[in-house]
Amino acid sequence: MAKTKVTFECMACGYQSPKWMGKCPNCGAWNQMEEVIEHKAKGPKTAITDTSANQKVEKLKDVTKETTPRSTTYIKEFDRVLGGGIVPGSLILIGGDPGIGKSTLLLQVCALLSQHDNVLYISGEESVRQTKLRSDRLSEDAGELSVYAETNLQIIHETVKKIEPKFLVIDSIQTIFHPEVTSAPGSVSQVRECTQELLRMAKSMNIATFIVGHVTKEGQIAGPRLLEHMVDTVLYFEGDTHHSYRILRAVKNRFGSTNEMGIFEMRQAGLKEVLNPSEMFLEERTKNVAGSTIVATMEGTRPLLVEVQALVTPTSFHNPRRTSTGIDQNRLSLLMAVLEKKQGLLLQQQDAYIKVAGGVKLDEPAVDLSVVISIASSFSDKATRGDDCYIGEVGLTGEVRRVARIEQRVQEAAKLGFKRVIIPKNNIGGWDFPPNIEILGITNIAEAIRIAFN
């Protein structure tokens, strides 16, 4: 009879302890320690995929640089986030809230890829019939897609060797288990071991592999943090289940930029890509109202026009509230302090609420000027022009500093019909202005406020 050993493992970080503890000493998470029964192994556990015989030590100068063509997913927004397409042999992790559309997105991608290449979709959460029902409501034809319902990693490996697909999808990694690991599927050890074997499989057999990962209530991918370090690309599928728009964002990408963002709209026939998101973010705005401004921001290589809304009201608390959605709260406090010091606006007894419409998170300095104007507009109850766009970084002395890629931002504003763009004066020069739009250069926030309310 095999000798057993009981340990306690943190489900958040994988820390192991001989006794149960309420708080993990490694990551500080509460109530994450779970009992794990370990059986004494009879021999060393062998990897399912053994590639040691195929590898050799080489000098870097002797390695030939081959141009590896990327494979398109036939969805432009998905290709944009990946950096131009799928790299052969890459391991891609996609996480998101339950019901947000992760499986629907991947099933659409697989349906398009299966029309040109061999694709294997492995579902550990649904049967083949259930996957068929879900594919029937999609607009894409998934008739050539190979579907397999299995959770045993050894059987999955044998099936992959037999079919030899070019693309592989695992939905989800929390349902797959390694038969030689004694813990339950979804545990830290199982997720770590299964991901390691899938990584070996992807690299040795040159199969581009997609892995679906569940997320915790904090929004992080469930399992050890090591999981995100092992894969090549980490994508988050974000959105509100009460709204139809979804955002695909890359937080790690070894083969492309992490600043790119893809926007989709959830419809009855599946997800449809939004090719002009600026129009989407501005379609419901009310023009010529106090506290509303437009900013041209950059998401990777794409310019976006979004609405920044501000509401400034007298406070009923001893300490006024500073609440922001889509903008860092510390930046909001800093910009309000600049307005008080340099413009004499008495904001000490005012609550301030800032929101970026559409659920976009803005973290670049170019949004500072738009936030300042929206706060001043709401405080004085004076409306700004609906065809104005504000771009610029605000310093602590009230100056407006130059920003990058000003030409692309202004061209996007001109394309959507804006008449004036207020930009830093140091950004003027060295590029051609678009026709039918007025460019106003400013050096400080006093000039910006004077132009906005004149």
Image (cartoon, grey):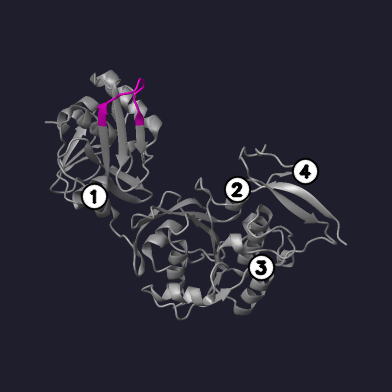
Residue appearing at x 34%, y 24% in the figure: 320
Q: Main secondary structure of the magenta part?
A: loop
Q: Earlier in the sequence, mark 1 or mark 2?
A: 2
Query: Tag 4, which secondary structure?
Result: loop
Q: CA distance from mark 2 to mark 3?
A: 21 Å
Between disc 1 and disc 4, the foreground one is: 4
Between disc 2 and disc 4, the foreground one is: 4
Residue 161 locus on image (x, y percent): 64, 75
Residue 397 locus on image (x, y percent): 31, 21
153, 409: nearer the viewer: 153
Outermost residue to the front:
316
Q: Earlier in the sequence, mark 2 or mark 3?
A: 3
Q: Earlier in the sequence, mark 3 or mark 1?
A: 3
| Residue wearing tag 4 | 18
Magenta region: which residues? 312-322
Outermost residue to the right:
1
Q: CA distance from mark 2 to mark 4?
A: 21 Å
| Residue wearing tag 3 | 153
Query: Tag 3, which secondary structure?
Result: helix
Query: Tag 1, which secondary structure?
Result: helix
Q: CA distance from mark 1 to mark 2?
A: 37 Å
| Residue wearing tag 1 | 282
Residue appearing at x 33%, y 55% in the figure: 243
Give the amino acid type for the residue marked by disc 2 in the picture.
Arg
Residue appearing at x 60%, y 65% in the figure: 202
Discs 1, 2 touching: Cβ within 8 Å? no
Give the amino acid type for the residue marked by disc 1 in the picture.
Leu
| Residue wearing tag 2 | 225
Give the amino acid type for the residue marked by disc 3 in the picture.
Leu
